[in-house]
Image: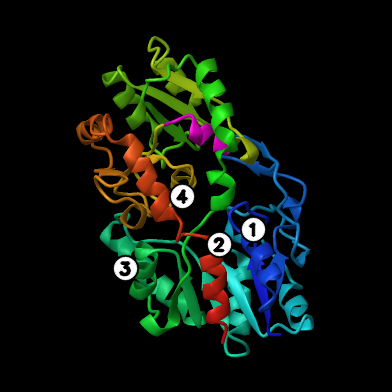
Amino acid sequence: MKKLAIIITHPIQYYSPLFKLLAERNKIQIKVFYTWEQSQEKVYDEKFGKEIKWDIPLLDGYDYTFVKNISKNPSSGTFKGVVNPILNSEIENWKADAVLVFGWNHHSHFKAMRYFKGKIPVYFRGDSTIIDSLSFPRKIARFVFLKFVYKFVDYAFYVGTNSKNYFLKYGLKEKQLFFAPHAIDNNRFSDGKYEEEAIFKRNELGIETDDIVFLFAGKFEKIKNPFLLIDAAIDTPKYKFVFVGNGEFENEMKEKVKNYSNVKFLPFQNQTQMPVIYNLCDVYVLPSQGRGETWGLAVNEAMACGKAILVSDRVGCAVDLVENNENGFIFESNNLDDLKEKIKLFENNYTTFGEKSLEIIQNWSFEEIAKSIENNFK
């Protein structure tokens, strides 16, 4: 059986189930090499402003190791936060037939790409896009640098339309690209057992049965642009708005709407509670303005719960997952008037839109990613 070494910084709820599935399918042998060993117990998330320890198992069902990280400031957020001198030798000792790297922007990941290029096939997984605007000098610098980076990639798995365009722009050819959709655990989120708890949660928040609820769940940060939805909530008091999460803007957001009863807040919710959170709403909203909203996996989660979707055109998944007037709408980023107009369009459609979301998301699954990896293993 061919052996695939997977390089990734730390256990992530969006990837660990995929690794377990690949191991269960037993068509290729995998071993995951985690490069940020300090993340074994819990992770401090600067944007949430708290330590996060996921309440679902992320290390069950597959072979893995945490590689010694000697960085003076260990972190997955900086290039020099991940420094693993023994990574390449560990992969060679395991006798890998190929390596799959998640993200190049870590010292050891890029070093591994350069080391293994020409020895064994180097696969790459990333979700970057070119939808964010840059100044001309930055565009040129980025183009030159990324063309250099992707010289060390033999094949890449793209997650959607914007991801594919990105790889093509920076030097990879069509024959080097394979579609492996961005996905979440659809089955966990579509389980109907959460609906009763969601009704109870709505009652706790003072939301009536016939209220239309718009949900924001994520970090209260600039990229996500939650203030735009706050402004929309103030101007459309007939609808309820629930904001779930924490972050740098939390106090300011709460202060701005302290006199508006149609806006509710809940703190960060762990993974086992997220299906409940999505089920308490009718429409999930992601008003991101970039830079950096490369996909938006919360949209997948909400769709798996059968919810209508409202996203800005700077959200990476919009072009693939949102069909205007079918399962939701795409609005112009930072355009408050457009956002408010789109909010009003959900009044008589959110139920059928939600049903369409559930239909669309079925093909965006871990099973499809696993098939793509297996079928394209050279």
Does residue 377 lie above or below 212 as drawn? below
Q: Residue at x 76, y 52 (%)?
A: 40
Asked whether the viewer can see residue 31, the reply is: yes
Q: State which tag comes first along the sequence, 1 or 2.
A: 1
Does residue 60 lie above or below 194 as drawn? below
Q: Distance between the residues labelled 4 and 2?
A: 12 Å
Which type of secondary structure does the marked residue at label 1 adopt? helix
- Which numbered tag is attached to residue 366? 2
- The residue closer to the viewer here, 103 or 164, is 164
Q: State which tag comes first along the sequence, 4 or 3.
A: 3
Q: Residue at x 58, y 80 (%)?
A: 114
**Crowd band around label 1 with a 10 angstrom C-alpha radius: few (<14), some (14–19), many (20+):** many
- Which numbered tag is attached to residue 140? 3
**Quarter-wise, where is residue 268 in the image?**
top right
**Crowd band around label 2 with a 10 angstrom C-alpha radius: few (<14), some (14–19), many (20+):** many
- Which numbered tag is attached to residue 17? 1
Q: Quarter holding the C terminus?
A: bottom right
Going by the picture, which residue comes out furthest to the top? 259
Query: What's the magenta region?
Result: 274-281
Which type of secondary structure does the marked residue at label 2 adopt? helix
In the image, is 109 to the left or to the right of 338? right
Q: How far apart are marks 3 and 2 (CA)?
A: 36 Å
Q: Quarter holding the N terminus?
A: bottom right
Amino acid type at circle 2 is: Phe
According to the picture, the residue beneath numbered tag 4 turns out to be 300
Q: Does the magenta stretch include residue 286?
A: no
Assess whether mark 2 and mark 1 are in contact (beta carbons under 8 angstroms).
Answer: yes
Which type of secondary structure does the marked residue at label 4 adopt? helix
Assess whether mark 4 and mark 1 are in contact (beta carbons under 8 angstroms).
Answer: no
